[in-house]
Image: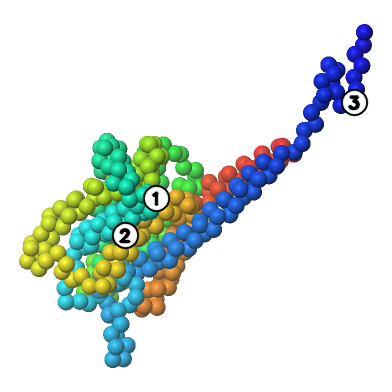
Amino acid sequence: MAVVTEKGKDRHNIPMLHSRPSPFPAALLQISYERQQTRGSMRIAVLVWLTLQNSIHTLLIRNSHQSVLLGSHSYSAIPFHRYSRARTVEHMFLSTVAVFFTEVMKVFICLGFVLLDETPKRFITTIMNQVVRQPYDTLKVCIPAMVYIVQNNLFYIAASHLDAATFMITSQLKIFTAAIFTALILKRALTRTQWFALFVLFVGVSLVQLQSSKSESSGLDGQKPLVGFLAVVIACCLSGFAGIYFEKILKGSAPVSLWMRNIQMCVFSIPSSFAAVFWQDGKTVVEQGLLLGFDWVVWLTVLWYCIGGLSVAVCIKYADNIAKNFATSVAIILATLGSMIFFSFQPTAQFLLGASLVIFSIFLYSSSQSLIKMLRSIAKAELLD
């Protein structure tokens, strides 16, 4: 006998449930959209800050020892890292001491951020659990911590022998070294476009260095552009290795906050930087004190160096390395303009060509992977259509 079915029921006389659109997907999409908007705003803010920080920091490290006389007033140029190593003062501060105080400031700032996330009662417990009671996890950051100390001292040496714009441009060699260590340590293959971009970067930096060597006689007394260039090259090699090694630690181990990782690094960097003070400048420190040559400019330079290191960590969290490179490219232009305004830097056609090649290489290297992903997405969409 045939089964008679009614409208709204199936063939077994079971009422059919009419599906209604759930409000939850729309709500989830709205929440996701709002989070993306917030993250996008934070990303833009971080990149703008990193651009300004890079520009001012470069001028600070090189120009902290030049005074600009205007009428009856003596003005210390506002940029400090370059200014801190190139101005005329009675006693030059010791760069090893500056690196030591940078690490001390860094650990206090990171402890402050950890305290914001934890209650005062849990603060000590958190530090003990993630630093003291996990010695092997803390020991992982020993190598990059030591390397960063040597790198920072080399950057101070380079800053003493190069003008701000040249220092900024040659520092971009760290992109080249980072790419090499990415292939060696992280086993990530680079595209032909990226390798071509690295070659363009090398040519651009070489042109800038040739400009610096030709103008050696016109620099400040005691400046040796070749010494500065070699210091930058070695520092960039160390920077590339330490950065990629640290990235491997962050992505290949248990999840630990960036602030806590920096605290773990300071466990090694503070004692090693203090030892470097007496290893390199022990006699001077014993005779004239640890704070020889320190004034408000030097302290501001140290603080700015500390903020710079932490800014990169924040940039990695809210943005990415590609966006960071774009910010660095803009910072090159701003640093060059700052040198022209504050320190009478006169770029030649050769320097401008080299700087242009460096900026072009950064954009080419950074955008190649994004372009490939975009083309793949377009091709996939066309196949679906």
Quarter of the image with the N terminus in it: top right
Left or right of 211 in this view: 149: left
Q: Secondary structure at mark 1?
A: helix
Residue 359: tell me if it is visible.
no
The percent coordinates of residue 204 (x first, y second) are 41, 60
Q: CA distance from mark 1 to mark 3?
A: 60 Å
Q: Is residue 295 above or below residue 74?
A: above
Q: Nearer the viewer, residue 227 or 303?
A: 303
Q: Nearer the viewer, residue 340 or 217?
A: 340
Classify mark 3: helix, strand or loop: loop
Helix, strand or loop status at disc 2:
helix
Mark 2, residue position: 306
Residue beneath disc 3: 7
| Residue 122 spot, x, y in % from top left | 33, 45
Q: Which residue is rendered at x = 12% and y = 55% of the image?
A: 279
Which residue is the extreme one toward the bottom? 72
Residue that numbered label 1 is attached to = 117
Circle 2 residues within 10 Å: few <14, some 14–19, many ≥20: many
The amino acid sitting under disc 2 is Cys
